[in-house]
Image (cartoon, rainbow, N blue to C red):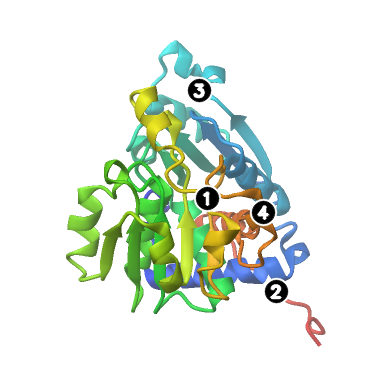
Amino acid sequence: MRHLIDPLDLSVEEIDALLALAGDIAADRTRYASVCAGKKLATLFYEPSTRTRLSFEAAMLNLGGSVLGFATADSSSATKGESIADTIRVISCYADVCAMRHPKEGAPLRAARYSGIPVINAGDGGHQHPTQTLTDLMTILRRKGRLSNLTIGLCGDLKFGRTVHSLIKSLARYEGIRFVLISPEELRVPDYVVNEVLRPQNIPYEEVTSLEESMPKLDILYMTRVQRERFFNEEDYIRLKDTYILTPAKMALAKPDMAVLHPLPRVNEIALEVDDDPRAAYFEQAQNGVYVRMALIMTLLGLAAPERKENEGC
């Protein structure tokens, strides 16, 4: 039995295979419509979520399985003081695989230690978000045709952005990756990401404050929102929330084939007018999340892709 808690739980070869499966699902979703018949996914979301939770649920339903769980901690026995260890022991009696989001870093890892079913980290505090990273990688691959030899700009909240931390860790394993880290001083990428990932692997990176000056060199721009829920006081949030806003004028500085990604939800960091730019990939990114999670559920449950019919593809 395997879990997915950290992006590095999967080797590069396993990620490539999973993305290939996700691509095959995207090309012919109906062929996978009953792969998980009789299987159940438990979604344990102790923190609010729209896209991630619904994406997991859509993924399991698309595979012919069913879903149970809760959308907030208030509707779980956590309000009665039940521990994560006890919750996952019980859920293991009801479901075949579990997706957990929790505001505390390390909570899904703790759950995995007591679980009788595969646990998927659907986001733990400001730490990791591995399935969003797989979604990001699939979107980059489909847009650029490769995951190597790219200049990746990460903009906004790089301190608390768990999607940023996970993406850096994953992309750092591919050849020729360069990072441009665009943020205000207060929201720079944490020291552990620099000291444990970038420097030891000699990954080229620069920390800058200007989005405009960075635009011409980027192959991918990964925008993030300043996360109100991660701040300790309202004043700091208000001061920093509008630091970067992507507009058509700034897009005019970018390469014709650059792709803009965003893990969503956005607040105002991407102007609505940018949605009409063909380089805007964030809604496509949300769709890719369903395919990636379908592939991941299949992989963790050890389910093979259905065989093609003899005349299929002719």
Tag count: 4
Task: Write down the residue under mark 4.
Answer: 273
Query: In the image, what residue occupies the spot 39% across and 65% down?
Result: 214
Disc nearer the start of the sequence (2/4): 4
Nearer to us of marks 2 and 4 is 4
Q: Are marks 2 and 4 in contact (CB under 8 Å)?
A: no
Disc nearer the start of the sequence (4/1): 1
**Camera-side residue: 192 or 41?**
192
Task: Write down the residue under mark 2.
Answer: 307
Residue at the limit of the structure toward the top, as seen here: 80
Q: Which amino acid does label 4 sit on?
A: Glu
Q: In the displayed structure, does residue 289 sit left or right of residue 197?
A: right
Location of residue 192 in the rendering, given as x and y in whole percent from the top left corner = 21, 50
**Label 4 – label 1 distance at C-alpha:** 18 Å
- Neighbor class of circle 4 (other Cα within 10 Å; few <14, some 14-19, many 20+) is few
Q: Are marks 3 and 2 in contact (CB under 8 Å)?
A: no
Location of residue 98 in the rendering, given as x and y in whole percent from the top left corner = 52, 41
Task: Write down the residue under mark 3.
Answer: 73
Task: Write down the residue under mark 1.
Answer: 263
Q: What residue type is labelled 2?
A: Glu
Disc nearer the start of the sequence (2/1): 1
Query: In the image, what residue occupies the spot 61% across and 37% down?
Result: 50
Q: Which amino acid does label 1 sit on?
A: Pro
- Neighbor class of circle 1 (other Cα within 10 Å; few <14, some 14-19, many 20+) is many
**Label 2 – label 4 distance at C-alpha:** 44 Å
Nearer to us of marks 2 and 1 is 1
Query: In the image, what residue occupies the spot 51% across and 68% down?
Result: 253
